[in-house]
């Protein structure tokens, strides 16, 4: 018996796919929104049994389509976010501020529950466009739909991520790796399965009108994260502190790539710790702790980046 219908924006991403699998186990029906059903459909179709998943291609800035979709469901879950801007439309303001605002307005008018994924560690980062856009998005939601729940995860990782996999690819071939701000920035990495479990917990228990910080079970510095990744792929590399001037210069050139390794905005963001705030309500506080530890979990898929692994580079550095 299907219990509820959930509309997921960003369903084809790593968090979305884990959420689909978690919800259909408990007989929720999912409407997954994607920009390109032909390209993403084959990925999404494998996530749920027949009858539990509808895949809809839609322009997220088409208000009439948003109203149509939200009118069909009990809960709207927004997972959409970008790390760098692409063109005039896919910019931080549109994706992180204007779009969540519109969802909040429609959900409020249609009496649909709303869960929004934002980010941890953004409150102090006023010099980051990414952080400012996220903060504005949260502000709009709180003003328009006070009963919404906002989830603020730290670094989210998995075998399908764009974090550990990218770093392991670089560490497998580069003779050294730069440490921005000395590598001292702190994070509380949360595995995507723990985040999906938290989202399920909140929706199934109707835990609304909250802002929840989603964190893993340990605090790690950026340097420690790199050291763990090197250990997992059995490599030795120099981790060198990079002067801020050089860091920003390197980011200036990297951000012109189609998929930049790092941008000037991300350099600014790295100044600020990504950990629980002093008075913040966390997933641990509400009885849904992050359980998976970083090293133990990454080890299970890091073999792909070891010598001879699927993603090991032909360039060998001893």
Image: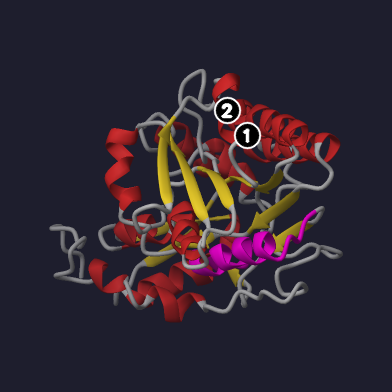
Image side of residue 195 versus residue 35, left or right? right
Residue in view at x 20 percent, y 63 percent: 312
Residue 150 part of the magenta-drawn span: no
The image shows residue 267 at horizontal and vertical percentages of 57, 44
The number of discs equals: 2
- The CA span between labels 2 and 1 is 5 Å
Residue tagged 2: 68
Image side of residue 172 versus residue 177, left or right? left
Residue 193 part of the magenta-drawn span: yes
Residue in view at x 60 percent, y 55 percent: 181
In terms of secondary structure, where does tag 1 sit? Answer: loop
- Colour option used: secondary structure
The image shows residue 125 at horizontal and vertical percentages of 72, 44
Image side of residue 312 versus residue 264, left or right? left
Residue in the foreground of this view, choosing between 92 and 281: 281
Residue in view at x 35 percent, y 68 percent: 237
Residue 184 visible (yes or no):
no
Where, quadrant-wise, is the C terminus in this rendering? bottom left
Instruction: State the mark number for residue 71.
Output: 1
Residue in view at x 41 percent, y 56 percent: 161
Question: Compared with residue 118, is residue 309 higher up or lower down, i.e. above or below?
Answer: below
For the magenta stretch, what is the residue range? 185-208
Residue 205 visible (yes or no):
yes
The image shows residue 291 at horizontal and vertical percentages of 57, 79
In terms of secondary structure, where does tag 2 sit? Answer: helix
């Amino acid at each position: 018996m299907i219990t509820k219908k959930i509309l997921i924006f960003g369903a084809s991403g790593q968090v979305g796919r884990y959420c689909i699998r978690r919800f259909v186990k408990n007989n929720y029906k999912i409407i997954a929104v994607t920009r390109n059903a032909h390209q993403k459909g084959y990925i999404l179709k494998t996530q749920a049994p027949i009858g539990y998943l509808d895949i809809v291609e839609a322009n997220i800035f088409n208000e009439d389509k948003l109203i149509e979709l939200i009118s069909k469901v009990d809960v709207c879950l927004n997972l959409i976010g970008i790390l760098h801007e692409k063109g005039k439309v896919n910019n931080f303001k549109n994706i992180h501020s204007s779009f969540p605002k519109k969802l909040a307005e429609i959900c409020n008018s249609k009496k649909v529950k709303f869960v929004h994924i934002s980010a941890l560690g953004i409150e102090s980062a006023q010099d980051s466009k990414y952080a400012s856009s996220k903060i504005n998005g949260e502000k709009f939601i709180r003003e328009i739909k006070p009963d919404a729940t906002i989830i603020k995860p730290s670094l989210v990782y998995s075998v399908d991520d764009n974090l550990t996999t990218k770093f392991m690819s670089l560490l497998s071939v580069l003779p050294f790796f730069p440490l921005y701000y000395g590598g001292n920035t702190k994070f509380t990495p949360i595995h995507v399965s723990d985040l999906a479990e938290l989202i399920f917990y909140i929706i199934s228990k109707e835990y609304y009108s909250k802002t929840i910080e989603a964190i893993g079970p340990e605090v790690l510095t950026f340097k420690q994260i790199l050291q763990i990744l090197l250990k997992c792929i059995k490599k030795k590399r120099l981790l060198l502190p990079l002067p801020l001037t050089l860091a920003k210069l390197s980011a200036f050139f990297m951000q012109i790539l189609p998929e930049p390794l790092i941008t000037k905005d991300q350099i600014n963001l790295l100044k600020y710790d990504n950990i629980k705030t002093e008075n913040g309500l966390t997933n641990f506080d509400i009885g849904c702790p992050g359980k998976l530890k970083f090293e133990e979990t990454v080890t299970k898929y890091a073999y792909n980046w070891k010598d001879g692994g699927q993603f090991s580079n032909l360039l060998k550095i001893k």
